[in-house]
Image: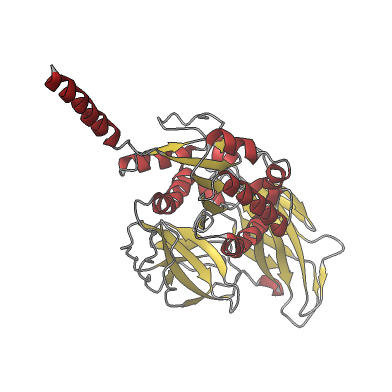
Amino acid sequence: MRTRAVVLPLLLAILGTLLYATPAHAAPVRIMPLGDSITGSPGCWRALLWNRLQSTGHTNIDFVGTLPTQGCGVAHDGDNEGHGGYLATNIAAQNQLVPWLAATTPDIVVMHLGTNDVWSNIAPATILGAFTTLVGQMRASNPSMKILVAQIIPMNPSQCSACAQRAVNFNAAVPAWAAANTTAQSPITVVDQWTGFSTSADTYDGVHPNAAGDQKISDRWYPALTAALGGGTTDTTPPTTPGTPTPGSLSSTGATLTWTPSTDSGGSGLAGYDVYREMGGTDQLLGSTTTPSLTLTGLTPATAYQVYVRARDGAGNLSQPSGLAAFTTQPGGTGGGCTAAATVQTQWSTGYVVQPVTVANPGTSTLNGWTVTFTLPAGHAVTGYWNAAVTVSGQTVTAKNLAYNGTVAPGQSTSFGFQASRPSGNSQLPTGYACAA
């Protein structure tokens, strides 16, 4: 009896020690997708990102937010803080983030925010001041918060012709702000969602992503998020330098470029190419593509161009520039002593504004009247015009001077403009501008 009385408590003590010594499973990492309608409704990039993380072994995660799944038809953890129409400046000023953080306690915030502020013509410094407030609230919730901040996708809505440049200006200010506010305990990582994203090909309205856009957004978040999860390192290896482009199919307003493709060894995959015009300062982005060729449109007739290509990968790394290719567009038509050259002022998925169409007199005698003709792509229609009398026959547009701008002195010019509609997703532009006096 004495032996039993001693052994039984001893066994219970050993069993208790073993039970308490068994390690518990680590709590899932809580990730808050934070933003506006691009994140929230339906925010299908979140579904793509969630499922890619699951398929690559990042299963101990929990997407969190006070908002539920908002569609997509794809099984995923849909909790989020994607509030349609919200401005970063309002969220900060009204302390709206504080209760969201308290309800969800995230470890990582993935933030694509600022689009509505840009649309509202709020200065980048003011938006980033709001970002600073939000970061402070995140760190008050979790001093070790990891914060991924997007350079927002491009925007070119029909109701805001200035928004495209405003987005560029805002994105340009984000890296310096992040560098000034990051800390070792709570790092801020900038994720480039702008480069290579096309409002015509990757959105359905110039602002909100379509299926192709959702895929691009997901692809850009993935390497930065996996690095934050500790499941890998950030891909910093750029693609190889693409070959020097070869011009072909030259016209007065277009050219086709082809080049030797790049390769990527950094793990995030080759995402595409950007074609730039060498300007000696801030080079002009002429277009982007996922293949080693691009047809340029909207070029100026009788103009010399120098262009180069840079490849980009899924992590946003850019290759070194390719060699320069030089070409000159064909004349735009000089019958009767005048020339016509068109500039696209703005464009969106279902239309564009061409302004100015410059009518110049390169000769030595005064022009007394001019007529410009050009060709609309199939399915396009002129919806408005100014500083010219415009008629349309089939796809041929004829623009004639008005009484006040028909006289053009030697070496001088005048101009007109027009707006046109096109089928959604069609990126073509008018061609064949020609002038006759």
Between 208 and 256, the one lying in front of the other is: 208
78 relative position to 342: left or right: left
Instruction: Note whether 201 is above or below 294 in the view shown.
Output: above
Q: Give percent across and percent down for residue 241.
A: 37, 71
Horizontal placement of 19 versus 192: left or right?
A: left
Residue 105 in the image: above or below residue 365: above
Q: Which residue lies furthest to the top in this view?
A: 1
Q: Nearer the viewer, residue 38 or 345?
A: 38
Please report the residue visible at 80 percent of the width from the left and 58 percent of the height from the top: 387
- Check the image and name the residue furthest to the front: 2
Horizontal side, residue 89 vs residue 236: left or right = right
Residue at 51% across, 59% down: 195
**Percent of width and height locating residue 317:** 43, 63
- Residue 257 horizontal/vertical position (percent): 44, 67
Location of residue 418 by image quarter: bottom right
The quadrant of the rendering that contains the C terminus is bottom right
Identify the residue at image location x=38%, y=68%.
259
> Looking at the figure, which quarter contains the N terminus?
top left
In this rendering, position of residue 82 left or right of residue 248: right
Along the line of sight, the residue nearer the viewer: 361 or 271: 271
Q: Which colour scheme is used?
A: secondary structure
Q: Residue at x 44, y 28 (%)?
A: 73
The x and y percentages for residue 266 are: 33, 62
Can residue 42 be seen in this snapshot?
no
Quadrant assignment, res 397: bottom right
Q: How many marks?
A: 0
In the rendered image, is residue 145 in sight?
A: yes
Between residue 251 and residue 66, name the one nearer to us: 66
Residue at the limit of the structure toward the right, as seen here:
404
